Structure formats: structure tokens, C-alpha cells
Image: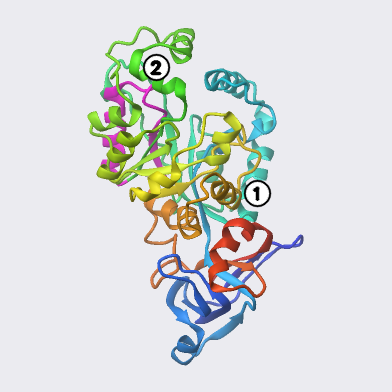
Amino acid sequence: MNVYNKSPNHQITKSPNSLHLHVARWVVPVSRPPIENGAIATFEGKIVGVGPASELRPSYPAVIKDHGDSILCPALINTHSHLELSPLKWRLSPSGSFVDWVRALIEARDLIRPEEWEPAICQAIKEMQENGIIAVGDVGNLDVIPLFSSRKDATWPFRGVFFQELVCPIPNGAEEEIPEPLDILGSSFHYAFSAHAPYSVAPQVLKAIKAWDQSHGMPFPIHVAESEEEIEFLQGGQGPLRELLKEKGHWPLNYDLPKASPVRYLEILGLLDRHTVCIHCVQVDRDDISILAKTGACVCLCPRSNVFLGVGVAPVEELHASGIPLALGTDSLASNDQLSIFAEMASLSKLAPGLPPEAIFRAGTYGGAMALGISEELGCLAKGKAATFLAVESGPIGNKDVLEFLVHEGCRGLGDLVIG
């Protein structure tokens, strides 16, 4: 059993692989209701049993770790981040225009000095670890994160996927647009491709990226309906996005714009299915929600980034009511002040007060694992899953308060990341 202690002098301690029984006042499997006086049995890095401690104790004569008045729950999943933008923390501010912010972001990224990458990324990694994140869907335009994560010094702690983001408004041949993937990532951190957005990637290239991800068993993420400017551009070819494309030499386009919403456009192209991750979905209407529900596409919410940029608030309660799978992401430190899924959960609860806490916590755990294709290992506490979970100190709380506590105060009580 390895225990990562979040105290100021945290360290990783090891003991030989053997049968362990972790008991606590509450166990929150996510895949089933919270268990009072629950237990998790682990053996050789896998969960072999979850249930009431009174039932598991006789069945598992194990080394017992008593977590007291704590909540044992799955470690968190950051489904959407841009770690390569970590050097830009505090350097950008919202201007009231999404496109002006994008323009400033491009300029600021080009000014990042080589010596800034490592300390900023190391600090970002530390922050995510300290906030209970075990896996990430990271998106980047450069090879900074793939090279960093492939180092042999054990600096990279996350499972998940790195998505090489492609921006290609005007293609020269779709078959030439998908580069060879970098074969440098480990077995638990995979490599795939993502499309930036419906307005910044030509339709034939969108299809090529989707086909590559699908053929390699990888999810297909894309920023969708993040701003009103995106809606204006796709429906009529006008507005600030057209001016930005002109500035970058990407206008006129050599294809017709869809005159449809971003979600409808992706449906027309045949790109929406249960392996598609639509990031943001702030500017969606009832028809869009119906399409997302029908196709089974996942929506990754980034509420704190959306608030920072002033692009609006996703209709989360309607998305949830329609049965659309939800996940949570932090986006980047260029549009967020922290990389904390606990902070995203707390913000989401305030922005969507009708959303049940169990739905919010599921989005930060199992929803993210499903979106990234790693739910066989992570996202909930069940037999056969990886023996990796959080111990959150809560004190004595009642059944109705367990998930509320995790959503609103989980970060304050976060103690150990337990790897059994």
C-alpha cells in the first residue's frame, strides 16, 4: 500500500503487496449510494471488495487501515486542461470579447521563454495532485507535455490522454493533415488527436481526426459552442472570428460554412457519438441538447473558465435532465486561477443549483473516466478497479450531507491519496 499524505511534509510510504482493508465512516463508490461504516478491500493494486465493514471484515482477514471519520471516494478526473499554458497564469484578463482574449492568448503564448516551461508545469502538476486529481485529458499544440510526461524521473503522475490539438481552417488535403503521433508516452498516459473547434478546423480535417481517434480506440474531444462569436460565425460567416481568420491568413475558406449551430454542424458531419467529448457547450439550445442526447456525446463542463471569460453559463440542469453524460475540466491557467476539480464542483453547484450533488460528483469522477476511456480502471470504487482513492476528512456527517460535503468542502478535508 502506498499512501500519499498531503501534509506539508508529505511523502510516499510503501509496504509489501498484500490484502488490505480500508475502513471509514463513509465510502462513496459513485457506482452505488454512499455506504455508512464502509470498507474497501484491496489486493495487489486492485479493489477486490466494497461494502459495509461489518460484511467485509469476516470475508477479508486483512491488514486494516482505519480512516476514522473520513470519506473514501474515487480520485478526481480533470477531463480538459491545457497544461502547456501554465506559464500564462495571471497574465491574461477577460476583455469582454472572447475573440480578443483568443488573440491575446496567441500572442502571450508566443512570448513564453524556454526557461519558464518547467517550473510552471511542475507547479501545475503539484497543484492538481494536491487537489486529488489522478487522471487528466490534456490538450496542447506543442510537444511540451508529451516530452515532459515521458521523462524517466517519475515527475509525471497522471493517467489519461494527451491530445495533440490541430488547428486547420484551410486544408491542403485531409489525408496529409494528421501527423504521425509521438511514440514517447507511457502505457497509462496515451496519445491522441483533438480538433480545436468547428470554426477553426475544416470539415474534411474534422472527419480525419475523428477517424484517427476512432481507429485507435481514443475519444475525440473538441471545443463546442463556447461563445456567441462562434454561433455568429458558423451561421453567417460574420463577426470577430471572421476578422481573426483574416488576420491569420485563413480567409476566404475553400468550403461553405454550415449555417447551423456548432452541435448541428458536428451532427451533419457524423462526428457525434458516445466517444465524442464536446467541451464547454455554453451556447446550446433545446435542439442542440436533443442532438447531444440522441447521439450519446459527452459534455465536458469548464464552469470557472466560462465565468472568467464571460461567455455565459452552460444549461447544465437541462443537459443533465436529458441524460447527457457530463464530465468536468479546469481548462487552463490562462482562463482559470486554479487547477482544482473540487473548485469546479463547488462553482457548478452555485451556477446550477438544481443539479443534484451526486450528479456533480459523478461528473468529476466517473464522468471524466468515461469521457477519457479509462473507466475500466478509474472513476468509481468497485471490484476490479484500480485501488486508488481519496481519504477526505469530514468529521461526523449524515447520509444526506456526504455528497454535499464533497462538492462544497471536499478540498478542505482532503487528506491522503491512497494507492493500495
Marks 1,2: beta carbons within 8 A: no
The answer to which image quadrant residue 228 occupies is top left
Residue 212 lies, with reference to residue 70, above or below; the image says above
In the image, what residue type sits under mark 1?
A: Glu
Left/right placement of residue 107 relative to residue 172 reads: right
Determine crowd level at label 1: few under 14, some 14-19, many 20+ residues with C-alpha closer than 10 A: some
Left/right placement of residue 269 relative to residue 236 reads: left
Left/right placement of residue 270 relative to residue 50 reads: left
Residue sticking out furthest to the right = 8
Visible residue check, residue 49? yes
Q: Position of residue 180 (x, y in %)?
A: 36, 32
Name the disc covering residue 144, or none: none
**Of marks 1 and 2, the one in the foreground:** 2
The quarter of the rendered structure image containing the N terminus is bottom right
Q: Describe the element under mark 2 as helix, strand or loop.
A: helix
Does residue 228 show up magenta in the picture?
A: no
Query: Viewer-proximal residue, 289 or 392?
Result: 289
Q: Position of residue 178 (x, y in %)?
A: 33, 28
Q: Residue at x 59, y 51 (%)?
A: 346
- Counting residues from the start of the chain, the first of labels 1 and 2 encountered is 1
Left/right placement of residue 287 relative to residue 112 reads: left
Q: Describe the element under mark 1 as helix, strand or loop.
A: helix
Residue that label 1 marks: 127
Magenta region, residue range: 190-217
The colour scheme used to paint the residues is rainbow
Q: Residue at x 67, y 73 (%)?
A: 395
CA distance for labels 1 and 2: 37 Å
Query: Viewer-proximal residue, 245 or 112?
Result: 245
Does residue 212 show up magenta in the picture?
A: yes
Q: Position of residue 135 (x, y in %)?
A: 50, 52
Q: Position of residue 181 (x, y in %)?
A: 38, 36
Residue that label 2 marks: 233
